[in-house]
Image (tube, coloured by chain):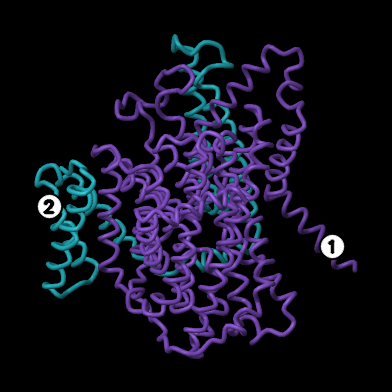
Amino acid sequence: MDAILHSLVYFTQPKFVLLCGLGSIAGLFVGSIPGLSVSMATALLVSITYTWSANDALATVMGVYVVGVFSGALSAILLNIPGAPASVVTTLDGYPLAKRGEAYKALKYATVYSFVGSVFGLVALALLAKPITSIALKFQPMDYFLLAMFGLATVGGLTTKSFSKGLVSAVFGLFFAMIGMDSVLGTPRLTFGIRNLNAGISTVPALVGLFGFAEVLSVVFEGQMDATVNNITRQVVKVKDMLREFWHSLYYSLIGTVVGALPGAGGPVAAFLAYSQAKNIVKKPSRPFGEGAVEGIVASESANNACIGGALIPMLTLAVPGDAVTAIILSVFYVHGLQPGPMFLTTSAESFYAILGGGFIGCVFLLLLGLLVAPHLSKIINVPKTVLMPIVGLLCVIGAYACNNRLFDVGLMFFFGVLGFGMRARGYSVAPMTLAIVLGNMMDSNFRRAISLASSADSKLLALFGRPITMILLVLTLFSIISNVPAVRRMLNRRKEAKAANE
Amino acid sequence: MDNNGKKSLLRNSNCQDSIFVGLCSVALLAYSLYHHANDRNTGEWKTSPYLFPVLISVFGLLLAVSLMADALHDLHSVQETANAVEGGAKHNLVGALVFIAASVAYYLLMPLLHFIPATIVFLGGLFVYLGERKWWKILLLSVITTGAVYALFGLGLNVRLP
């Protein structure tokens, strides 16, 4: 509760509120325009906020994050194209409702329940961060290594259809993270004589390339430069009717928070889960699900926005990001000299409150922008890609250059952009690679530390895996890997089918 | 496996990826072992900078095997045919390649022409290529965007633009 009270102090700081507001406006546009994404905007923001104070940067990033996740619903409702992957489920009922001439109603429900979900997730973050931190303080190097492995394995399994491809993406990310000066002995490694690589692969150009430039190339490759927008006509939506779904929305928000805290699952999974729950618990929807049921929009939007707070829990307390955006936010922390992890709440309590404060202020902006500005956005959402893509391409070049003022980083950004584009074209997700680039050095140093500590023990295996936390993490990691192996999956499916046939 | 079977296996994307990942992993393994043996500063394996790269290469090899298993499974299932049909959608690969080429040209031209002229040429060229035909719009957008980016990064954030 203390944390929430501390975070509310930020409402009285005009500069903080202003920056958060600017971030929110940027998030509204970025999230609602298909082809631009929150991850892309956050990656570009890292380079813009490079010279700012940590709190100013966090205010802006939180504004973009909170409103950006919500605004994916705008294009989902108006264009039938989700502005963000988390809004895929919103299209199922949002677009049919808009086609019936009730786009305004759909937008209002999406706004109000995105607000409920976001606040729920942030309150959960405020309440759970301390207890989780006290567990995390007992972690040893091997635990951190296994936790990161578990994160990569689940992200790899959930972000692509093929588990092997997800893990290949993660393995290449780990390889890129190894390039540069070794953190333990200080010797250059895998630099192939290129002096600019001695400091390692800068995360900013890599992230801008993987999310920004690759996305631009994908949009050009897919060739869909225009779309048709549904018109919005104002209509009266009674508060009483709208609040009828409030208690259900808390349940969907709980699903969103839990799913968000699991590495890799993120908004799309949370929204799908909540939607399937809504189908079960709502006996008399306003319209059949899939044909414009506002209950479907409520489920999807509460859950995917609650993921924000959920995803921040492991990122802040364990330094293990829950999704691509939190992986990028983690790099914002590193850029500003902050060290998330078990000691974060003790050493950087102010930054923790700033994140919460930024989140809550972002929620207020979400409500304001969603109710007042979003209904007028239909024209802007339809910005022709012929104009948008070159501008985003330019921002990627400048964003990569700005972080170190060197053209080498622009080259790196191109490399990662083309790599990300190629990966998407071949069915690989870039999210596991991002996570691996961010976590690689932590995994390397903890793994070697664990091996060094165990080498002096009598029973090396017991020293490595003998502690209860380590055993739990090892079982979780092995389970997440083995259960996703295609052959095991096929075998389990065959058994299920055989069992169903027998019944 | 007959010749046709081998050909269709090699055409399978999982098989191609498996070979690529396998080769990369072997190269990383060889590199790490060689450097651990020859670099004077590496010390024992437990502290060696090449311990983790060796682990990565082992993961990579296992994944190459897993991708190959996926490829073999694809060969025996109907899924592959469905994917092939699905993959027939029209894409603008040339557009993406032109975008990459334009960006690389911009990267090379920036130090020679300086930021503002190079950016106006880059933006204008891409607007035209992607289908914008109104010359006043192209000119206006190129100049305004360049000015805004210069103001934000060059003047506002003190980035030393080329």
Q: What kind of residue is marked 1?
A: Ala
- As drawn, the chain in cyan is B
As drawn, A233 above or below A73 = below
Number of callouts in the render?
A: 2
- Depicted A497 relative to depicted A406: above or below: below
Q: Please tell me which residue lies in front, B83 or A248.
A: A248
- Residue A249: horizontal and vertical position, in percent? 65, 70
Chain of residue at mark 2: B
Q: Quadrant of residue A33?
A: bottom left
The circle drawn on residue B116 is: 2
Residue positioned most to the right = A503
In this view, the mark in front (2 or 1): 2
- Tell me whether the residue at label 2 lies in contact with that at label 1, contact meaning CB atoms closer than 8 angstroms: no
Q: Which residue is mark 1?
A: A498
Chain letter tied to purple: A
Which element is circle 2 on?
Answer: helix
Measuring 50% from the left and 87% from the top, which residue is drawn there? A102
x and y percent of residue B112 in the render? 10, 43
Q: Image check: B156 left or right of A308? A: left
